[in-house]
C-alpha cells in the first residue's frame, strides 16, 4: 500500500492533470469554426468540395490579389 507521501503526490499529480485538461478544453471551446452570414450557399446534396492545387513559380511571397 502507499504511504502518505506517495498518496499525496499521486493526488497532486491527478489534480494537475485534471486542471490542465480542463484548461485546455475551456481554451479550445471558444475556437470553433463558424460561417459568416446566414443561409445555405451549397445545395444539400453536396458533401465534398474540391479545391485545386495551385503553384506559384515566382520568387514573390504570397499571391497577388485580382
Image (spheres, rainbow, N blue to C red):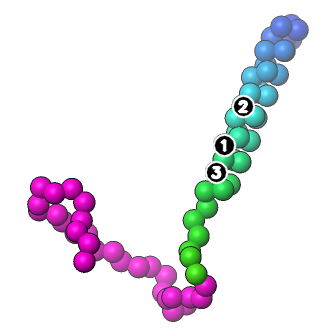
Is the N terminus in the top left, top right, bottom left or bottom right quadrant?
A: top right
The residue wearing badge 2 is 17
Q: How many residues crowd around disc 3 within 10 Å: few (fewer than 14), some, or many (20 or more)?
A: few
The residues tagged by marks 2 and 3 sit, at their Cα atoms, a distance apart of 17 Å
Residue drawn 21% across the image and 56% down it: 61
Query: What span is colored magenta in the figure?
Result: 38-66
Asked whether residue 45 appears in the rendered view, the answer is no
Q: Disc number at residue 28?
A: 3
Q: Residue furthest front?
A: 65
- Disc 3 to disc 1: CB gap under 8 Å: yes
Q: Disc number at residue 24?
A: 1
Residue 55 picture location, percent across and down: 18, 65
On whether residue 53 falls in the magenta region, the answer is yes
Secondary-structure class at tag 3: helix
Residue 7 or residue 42, whichever sits in front: 42
Residue 66 picture location, percent across and down: 25, 77
The residues tagged by marks 3 and 1 sit, at their Cα atoms, a distance apart of 6 Å
Secondary-structure class at tag 1: helix
Earlier-in-chain disc, 1 versus 2: 2
Residue 3 picture location, percent across and down: 86, 7
Vertical arrangement, residue 7 with respect to residue 25, above or below = above
- Disc 1 to disc 2: CB gap under 8 Å: no
Amino acid at each position: 500500500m502507499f504511504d502518505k507521501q506517495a498518496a499525496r503526490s499521486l493526488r497532486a499529480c491527478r489534480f494537475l492533470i485534471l486542471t490542465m485538461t480542463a484548461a485546455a478544453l475551456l481554451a479550445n471551446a471558444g475556437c470553433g469554426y463558424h460561417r459568416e452570414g446566414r443561409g445555405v450557399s451549397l445545395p444539400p446534396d453536396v458533401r465534398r468540395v474540391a479545391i485545386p492545387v495551385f503553384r506559384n513559380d515566382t520568387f514573390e511571397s504570397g499571391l497577388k490579389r485580382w
